[in-house]
Every structure is written in C-alpha cells, then in structure tokens.
Amino acid sequence: MSEPLRVLFVCTANISRSPFLELTARSLAGEGADVVFASAGTHGFDARAMDEAMVPLLPGGAAAAGHASRRLTREIMAEADVVLTAESAHRTFILEEFPQHFRKVFTVGQFAASVAEHPELTGRALVEAAAARRTPARPEHDIADPYRRGDVAAATAADTMSRMLSVIVPRLAGGTDG
C-alpha cells in the first residue's frame, strides 16, 4: 500500500482558518480516504483551541475537540506533500522561510483554480500537475481572516473555505497514485 497523500493547511495562528480547513476536509473526504489532513500557523501560540466563532460553522461530522494550534516548523513542512495557505501572505512567508518547498505551496484558492485546469487528474498526479503548471495566486484566492471580526466575517470565511474545499477534496481523495 502506498503512503497517504499528506495535505497541510496553513494560516496565521492555526486557530480559525487552517483548523476549519483541516476538519472540514477530513469530513468531506470521509472514512477510508488515503489522504491525511493537518494544519499549522505561521505565527501565534502553541496549543490554543479553535476559535469559538468558527466551531459551530464546521460541517456536521467535524469536531473541533482536541484541536491544539501549532506553529509551522521545518519538520512539519518536510512531512507535507502539498501545502495550502489561507492567503498569499502565508504563502510568501513560507517561501521566504522554506524556499526549497516552492513546488508544493499554493494558496487554497490558487490550488482550487489549478484543479479546474486538470479535470482528469486526482491525488498525487493532480498535485504534481499543479506544481508543474500553476495558476497565479490572485487576491480573490485569499480567505479573509475572520478572527475577532464577528459572526458575519466567520460565516463568510467558512462559506468561502467550504466552496473551495468542495472542489479540492474530492479530487485529492479520488486517488493518491495518480
């Protein structure tokens, strides 16, 4: 059996967007998917719970209990097959800190746009094709930070992330061997 595809979501503090992305992706992929989803933050604190405003917006099967924020490290980056950031500022930070990982770092929106360009590919083959011919990152690909901005901002961010994940996750979970 092949190694599972490892997908890492990154935001600023790993308490709002990236845990929402991680937990929602797990829910969408379902049991038995050969994909492992994780998350980390570029800054912030270790071992913080998920932001309370985002928790009720998780899909029914996703549970925030047990989430503890963590800071992005060299080891976490090395373990990931693809890294999807909430916004281009996170992607820039990662590429400045870990330039050797250029081919596997995208914004979530940028990767969703790349998925549309490769309708026949799934899993690792999709990741490789996206890395070889990437869609440019655009401001509309960014997911606005909802932290401490109220329920409307949280709901807007959750809706944006859910829409992007509905494009990405089935294709990543569709096969890891390509």
Image (spheres, rainbow, N blue to C red):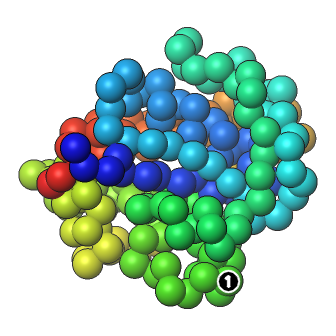
- Side of 35 where 100 appears, left or right: right
- Is residue 9 visible in the rendered image? The answer is yes
- Across and down, in percent, residue 154 comes to 73, 34
Mark 1 lies on residue:
97
Quadrant where the C terminus lies?
bottom left
Against 90, residue 32 (above or below) is above
Farthest top residue in view: 60
- Side of 32 where 151 appears, left or right: right
Farthest front residue in view: 1
- Residue 139: name its quadrant: bottom right
Quadrant where the N terminus lies?
top left
Q: Residue at x 32, y 38 (%)?
A: 34
Q: Residue at x 55, y 12 (%)?
A: 60
- Give the crowd class for mark 1: few <14, some 14-19, many >=20 residues within 10 Å: few
- Side of 142 where 16 appears, left or right: right
Q: Residue at x 74, y 41 (%)?
A: 16
**Closer to the camera, 100 or 143?**
100
- Is residue 107 visible in the rendered image? The answer is no
